[in-house]
Image: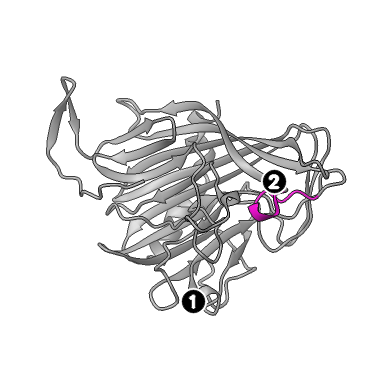
Amino acid sequence: MKFRHTLSCSLSIILGGQLLAVGELQVTETGDSITVTRGEVPVLTYHKAEVPPPEKADPIYKRSGFIHPLCAPNGEPVTGIHPADHYHHLGLWHAWVKTRHGKDSPDFWNLRGRTGRVRYVKTIQLHKGSDRDASVGFVVEQEQVAYKGKERRETVVLKEHFGIRVEFVGGENRVSYRVKQTNVSGEALVLPAYRYGGGLAYRAPHHWDQTNSDYLTSEGLDRTNSHATRARWVAMWGPTTKGAATLTVMMHPENRDFPQRLRTWPPSSHNGAIFFNIVPTQEHAWEIKPGEQIIESYLLRVSDGKPDKDKIEKGWNEWAGDALKNLEPLKK
């Protein structure tokens, strides 16, 4: 999908008899996607329809239920999709990897194994904002589905309510990312300790590498020493055609095993590409029993320029105590 990256301006336009600021946030749903824009500037797109991989890749890598692009305030993407080294990396997504479910071990992340996947099911709510609320967003239902036994019997293991809320504050795109998962099967989903999977995952644009990009964690670590450490937030930055941009992922203190452990890549991995994953089970195993519900909440702040550690730290402190209240409209 192509987007116009036109910068917004301070003028107003007449649309349908109403005076609207060009920079006003809007959410639009089609049969294939849900898109948030700020005037004509793209903010993010969520994919309802399955997106095919590159032409020569195995069609098994098609998938729905992810965000790409996520854009900086300047309108340029800060996500990448279907990189040649990992066709299953899809901008912003989440899925469990190493699991046990009865006699099977479904992997909802690595599609090549054909044992599981995540998919969009339906839209539950569009939040279009109001005179009192400038934010927009949506709630969708997703499924983590296993293909069990030799016959690859389809079994829905987790039903998800996936909520996104977008604000434009202080020159930043701020995206609340909330996942509520319920085990709707008759067996526990066992999650052994493993190095990646589960929580929010991110792949940066393909041109971000060891020469022009990096990580910065709340503990002051970078690509050389942040893997398997704990953090309250992680910032990742790199170049766009309109200057540097930063994506900061903040983790809520009520998330499992907080401060949460990280999966990051060292400079030697894939030419220093930026891949990031919050891993609630990296150190300690977990189990989601039949009928049990779990919730993970994050705040994504996308800004132009490189990260400012003091500013991010202040922002995390302001958000952490208030995040669940701010997400109340998406709990329905």
Residue 217 picture location, percent across and down: 51, 66
Q: Which mark is residue 271?
A: 1
The correct choice, above or below, for 188 with respect to 123 in the image is below
Left or right placement of residue 169 versus residue 215 in this view: left
Q: Which residue is identified by label 2?
A: 116
Residue 39 picture location, percent across and down: 24, 39
Residue 264 picture location, percent across and down: 57, 67
Three-letter code, disc 1:
Asn
Choose between 318 and 119: the one closer to the eye. 119
Residue 166 picture location, percent across and down: 40, 40
Choose between 307 and 51: the one closer to the eye. 51
Image quadrant of residue 244? Answer: bottom left
Judged from this view, the residue extending furthest toward the top is 17
In this rendering, does residue 322 appear at all? Answer: no
Give the main secondary structure, helix, strand or loop, of the magenta stretch.
loop
In this rendering, does residue 315 appear at all? Answer: yes
Other residues around mark 1 within 10 Å, as few (<14) / some (14–19) / many (≥20): some
Image point 42% across, 58% down: which residue? 247
Number of marks present in the image shown: 2
In reply to whether residue 247 is colored magenta, the answer given is no
First in residue order: circle 1 vs circle 2? 2
- Secondary structure state at the residue bearing disc 1: helix
Three-letter code, disc 2:
Gly
Magenta highlight range = 105-114
The reply to whether dot 1 and dot 2 touch (C-beta < 8 Å) is no
The correct choice, above or below, for 308 with respect to 160 in the image is below
Which image quadrant: the C terminus? top right
Image quadrant of residue 16? Answer: top left
Image point 32% across, 47% down: which residue? 2
Which numbered mark, 1 or 2, is in the foreground of this view? 2
Image point 44% across, 58% down: which residue? 80
The correct choice, above or below, for 120 with respect to 131 in the image is below
